[in-house]
Image (tube, grey):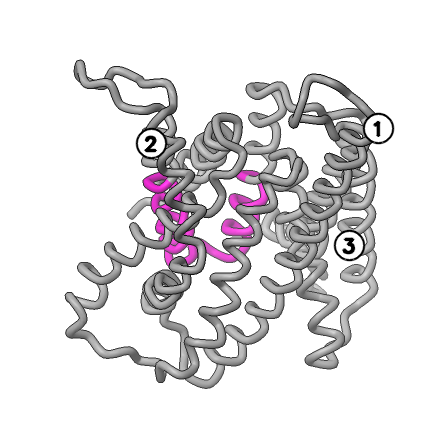
């Protein structure tokens, strides 16, 4: 496959996935659990058919290694999607998730006793400062959705919900980093099996959604009552269409990134994923008219700039152009 194909699919799948998620949140702010469940179910069914061969294929990595990783993966996905319902704007949500390098480095120092060069520490400082600036800037955008009045009690209630949402994002950020460290050690021992991990990460947690079944059912009822859209003359509730779009584009996004890692160098993958996040952020701001001040722009620039510095993207680009290499003696 030509590398241009997975690169294009990453932008199409991942960016449109964010659009469908924002449409869902604007239609129903409590749709986080049903979105997570639908994504897990779809990818698990696809893997059961096309990877696991209807359960006949055994795993290359012993199953007991998956349970710890799967439990963390489940919690991270659920908490991340639930946080949106706590007055967290999509731009802030995307900026927080772009700060995963910072969390990985902190836990790498604490758990693995790793040491990094100065540029890594500076880049993580940039990312941390960027997230802090965006968080402080977003604090002034918290609005009361519970009633038309803007009483002190309403403002305090909504601000408290926003703080809970921020705490959830921080928790998910560091839990995701812990999962990455565990996954790294597991792959070092048993080898990399990304298709297998993708399947088990989504299939094994499915029983856990029984704990969220009441919320998922009530949200489904609300989806049924959403404004219908005519599709081939058939009226279908719009939120169900948005959910279908979100699930399909999520699958395209995940599969495209996987293909990209097999077809392109790590530099290309880093650039594409970082640019994709930035494009999604810009689109969310412009199309959905999300509040984004000068401070937000400053914070976002620090986050994405720090990410590129941490991954040494600029250095690799410079070297790929033939600069920075020592000239051979005549």
**Which residue sits at x=32%, y=40%?**
248
Quadrant in the picture for residue 34: top left
- The secondary structure type at the circle numbered 2 is helix
Q: Is residue 308 magenta?
A: no
Which residue bears the numbered disc 2? Answer: 240
Residue 200 coordinates in the image, percent (x, y) = 35, 68
**Which residue sits at x=66%, y=62%?**
174
Quadrant in the picture for residue 193: bottom left
Residue 128 coordinates in the image, percent (x, y) = 79, 51
| 18, above or below 116, in the image | above
Q: Which mark is residue 83?
A: none
User: In this rendering, which labeled residue sits more in front, label 2 or label 3?
Assistant: 2
Q: Residues within 10 Å of mark 3 (few under 14, many from 20)?
A: many
Q: Which mark is residue 123?
A: 3
Look at the magenta stretch and give its main secondary structure.
helix
Q: Earlier in the sequence, mark 2 or mark 1?
A: 1
| 197 and 64: which is toward the camera | 64
User: In this rendering, which labeled residue sits more in front, label 3 or label 1?
Assistant: 1
**Which residue sits at x=76%, y=70%?**
116
Q: Which residues are magenta?
A: 247-276
Q: CA distance from mark 3 to mark 1?
A: 40 Å
Which residue bears the numbered disc 1? Answer: 152
Q: Residues within 10 Å of mark 1 (few under 14, many from 20)?
A: few
Image-based side of 141 in relation to 61, left or right: right
Q: Residues within 10 Å of mark 2 (few under 14, many from 20)?
A: some
């Amino acid at each position: 496959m030509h590398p241009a194909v997975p690169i294009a699919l990453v932008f199409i799948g991942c960016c449109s996935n964010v659009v469908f998620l924002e449409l869902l949140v604007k239609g129903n702010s409590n749709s986080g659990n049903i979105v997570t469940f639908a994504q897990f179910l779809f990818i698990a069914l696809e893997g059961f058919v096309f990877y696991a061969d209807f359960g006949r294929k055994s795993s290359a990595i012993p199953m007991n290694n998956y349970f710890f990783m799967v439990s963390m993966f489940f919690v991270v996905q659920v908490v991340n999607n639930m946080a949106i319902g706590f007055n967290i704007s999509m731009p802030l949500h995307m900026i927080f998730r772009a700060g995963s390098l910072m969390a990985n480095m902190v836990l790498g120092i604490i758990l693995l006793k790793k040491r990094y060069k100065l540029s890594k520490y500076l880049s993580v400082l940039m990312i941390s400062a960027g997230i802090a600036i965006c968080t402080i800037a977003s604090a002034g955008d918290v609005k009361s959705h519970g009633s038309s009045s803007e009483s002190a009690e309403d403002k305090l209630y909504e601000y408290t919900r926003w703080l809970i949402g921020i705490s959830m994002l921080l928790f998910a950020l560091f839990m995701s980093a812990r999962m990455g460290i565990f996954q790294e050690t597991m792959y070092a021992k048993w080898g990399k099996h990304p298709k297998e991990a993708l399947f088990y990460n989504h299939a094994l947690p499915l029983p856990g959604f029984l704990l969220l079944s009441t919320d998922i059912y009530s949200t489904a009822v609300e989806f049924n009552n959403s404004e219908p859209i005519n599709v081939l003359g058939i009226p279908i509730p719009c939120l169900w269409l948005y959910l279908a779009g979100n699930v399909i584009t999520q699958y395209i996004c995940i599969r495209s990134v996987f293909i990209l890692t097999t077809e392109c160098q790590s530099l290309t993958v880093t650039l594409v994923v970082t640019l994709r996040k930035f494009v999604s952020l810009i689109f969310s701001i412009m199309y959905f008219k999300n509040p984004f001040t000068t401070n937000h722009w400053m914070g976002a620039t620090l986050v994405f700039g720090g990410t590129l510095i941490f991954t040494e993207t600029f250095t690799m680009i410079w070297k790929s152009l033939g600069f920075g290499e020592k000239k051979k003696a005549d």
